[in-house]
Image (cartoon, grey):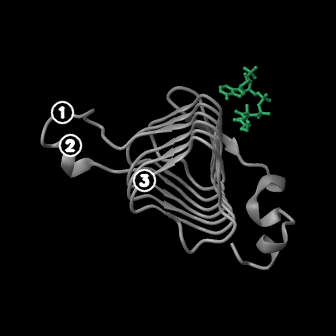
Amino acid sequence: MVPSSAGVLVADGAAVRERVSIGDRTIIGRGVTIENDCTIGSFVKIETGAYITAYSVLENRVFIAPMVATSNDRFIGRTEERFKHFKGVTVMRGGRVGVGAVLLPGITIGPDGVVAAGAIVTRDVPARKIAMGCPARVVREVAEAELLDHQIWDDVRLGQS
Ligand SMILES: CC(C)(COP(=O)(O)OP(=O)(O)OC[C@H]1O[C@@H](n2cnc3c(N)ncnc32)[C@H](O)[C@@H]1OP(=O)(O)O)[C@@H](O)C(=O)NCCC(=O)NCCS
């Protein structure tokens, strides 16, 4: 598992399935499950109990809060039709998903996009927007000070992630 990545931390009780790649310095928290065929970037944080469904992509610097749930099968295990639509979620660079949020199949969170705690995300969230509620709706822009490119971490400034 993740043989070539540096500084990856996988906490106790976490499960990382087959054909998953994980970038450098990523933290997989306690009891997290990452299903098969996911691509996880560098400097990603996936916190306690989060569930990352198969065929998902989390780009660099993504933050997934505790108990976030993601899904990939709109038809919940019924019909042959479902195989045509099977799709994991994508959280683009610097995207953040709040505690207990639910992402429906195929959802994309744009770069620096934010999902509020407890939201049910049924539509893509554009870059640098905050979506909130059930179903989630965009409520405002992410504050400038929170944007990834405004952080002072050395590796961000140097353009390494
Ligand atoms: C989305 C979030 C950033 C909004 O913060 P904020 O803009 O400071 O929001 P405020 O506390 O000023 O609340 C503004 C309004 O939004 C509502 N609201 C805030 N968070 C909400 C949420 N998650 N879902 C639904 N409504 C929410 C508030 O009730 C308030 O409504 P009101 O004006 O009718 O009273 C924040 O509430 C949130 O969800 N943070 C994520 C926490 C988290 O998961 N952290 C992970 C590490 S543990």
Q: Amino acid at mark 1?
A: Arg
Q: In screen coordinates, is 90 left or right of 130?
A: left
Q: Residue furthest front?
A: 12
Callout 3 crowding tier (Cα within 10 Å): few <14, some 14–19, many ≥20: some
Evaluate if marks 1 and 2 touch, with contact meaning CB atoms under 8 Å apart.
yes
The residue singled out by tag 2 in the image is 82
Residue at point 44%, 54% (across, down):
56
Q: Residues within 10 Å of mark 1 (few under 14, many from 20)?
A: few
- Label 3 residue near ligand 1, CB within 8 Å: no
Q: Position of residue 119 (x, y in %)?
A: 57, 31
Query: Which label lies toward us, 1 or 3?
Result: 3
Can you tell which quarter of the image residue 24 is in?
bottom right
Q: Report if the CB atoms under discs 1 and 3 are less than 8 Å apart.
A: no
Q: Give the structural element (helix, strand or loop) at label 2.
A: helix
Q: Position of residue 78 (x, y in %)?
A: 18, 33
Query: In the image, 141: left or right of 86?
Result: right
User: Which of pointers 2 and 3 lies earlier in the amino acid sequence?
Assistant: 3
Q: Residue at x 65, y 62 (%)?
A: 8
Q: Residue at x 82, y 63 (%)?
A: 150
Task: Depth check: give the residue in front, 4 or 137.
Answer: 4
Question: Gap between marks 1 and 3, in whole Å?
Answer: 24 Å
Tell me how far mark 2 sits from mark 3, CA to CA: 22 Å
Q: Work out which residue is located at the far left of the displayed protein and give it.
A: 80
Q: Secondary structure at mark 1?
A: loop
Whole-Å distance between the Cαs marked 1 and 2? 7 Å
Q: Which mark is residue 78?
A: 1
Q: Give the image location of residue 112, x and y in percent.
A: 66, 56
Q: Which quarter shows the C terminus?
A: bottom right
Can you identify the residue that label 3 sits on?
A: 17
